[in-house]
Image (tube, coloured by chain):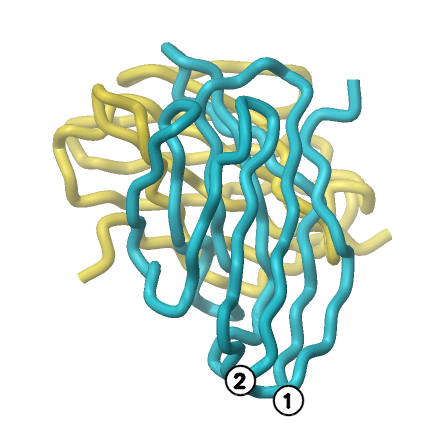
Chain colours: A yellow, B cyan
Amino acid sequence: QKEVEQDPGPLSVPEGAIVSLNCTYSNSAFQYFMWYRQYSRKGPELLMYTYSSGNKEDGRFTAQVDKSSKYISLFIRDSQPSDSATYLCATAPGSARQLTFGSGTQLTVLP
Amino acid sequence: NAGVTQTPKFQVLKTGQSMTLQCAQDMNHNSMYWYRQDPGMGLRLIYYSASEGTTDKGEVPNGYNVSRLNKREFSLRLESAAPSQTSVYFCASRRTGQSEQYFGPGTRLTVT
C-alpha cells in the first residue's frame, strides 16, 4: 500500500463547477500537507500549504485536512479552463525533510 | 530571481551512454532534491542533499550518482544509461525549517 493514495482521474468538469480533489494517507506522523499544480510539460508549483488539521483558503482554492480520517482535500470554486492541470498532494512528517507525493489527479475544465 | 533552473531541457541518449543533469537554485536554500516522474508513479525521490557536502539516497537511487558542487548547484549523473531511466527529471530545493519544496522546469530524458 502506498503511503499516499490519490485517484488519478482523469476528471472533467464544466467551467464554473466546484471541483473536489482528494488524497488519503496512512502515516499518522504526517503533519505538513501541500498541494502542487503541474501544467503539462512543466514543473510542479506549490499551490497550497497547511499544517496539521483544518482549512486554509486562498482565493478560489480551499485546502482541508482531516487528520482523524487521514484525508486531504482541495476544493476549487468557480473552476476555470486555466485550472486544467495535474494536481499532486504531498505530505511530510514533523522532520519535514522529505515529501511523500500522491500520483496526481489530472483535471480538465471544459469551457 | 530565476528560482530553480535545470539544464538541459531535453536529451536523447543511447543505452550505455553517460550524461550529467545540472540544477541550480538562487534562493539560498540548504536542501536540494532530485526526482523522477513516470506516468502513474508520481514523483519518486532519487537523491537529496540536506546541506552542502552531504548527500543521501532516496527511494530509487540505483543507476544514479549525485554531486553537491556548492550551495547553489546539485548535479545528477547517469554513468551508463538504460531504457528504464527514460523519464522526466525534476530538481527541487527547500529552505531549512520549512517543508515546502520548489521545483525546476524538468529535463525530459529518453534512452533508446
Q: Which quadrant is home to the N terminus of chain B?
A: top right
On screen, residue B97 versus residue B13, left or right, reads: left
* Viewer-closest of B87 and B76: B76
Specify the subunit that label 2 lies on: B
x and y percentages locating residue A53 in the rendered image: 28, 18
User: Disc number at residue B112?
Assistant: 1
N-terminal label among 2 and 1: 2
Q: Position of residue B50 (x, y in %)?
A: 36, 27
Could you tell me the amino acid type at mark 1?
Thr
Q: Nearer the viewer, residue A83 or B14?
A: B14
Marks 2, 1 in one chain? yes
* Whole-percent x, y for residue A19 in the image: 58, 42
Left or right of residue A3, residue A105 in this image: right
Q: How far apart are labels 2 and 1 at the CA level? A: 6 Å
Dot 2 crowding, Cα within 10 Å, few <14, some 14–19, many 20+: some
> Dot 1: few (<14), some (14–19), or many (≥20) neighbours within 10 Å?
some
Q: Of the numbered discs in the image, which one, if any, rests on residue B83? A: 2
CB atoms at circles 2 and 1 under 8 Å apart?
yes
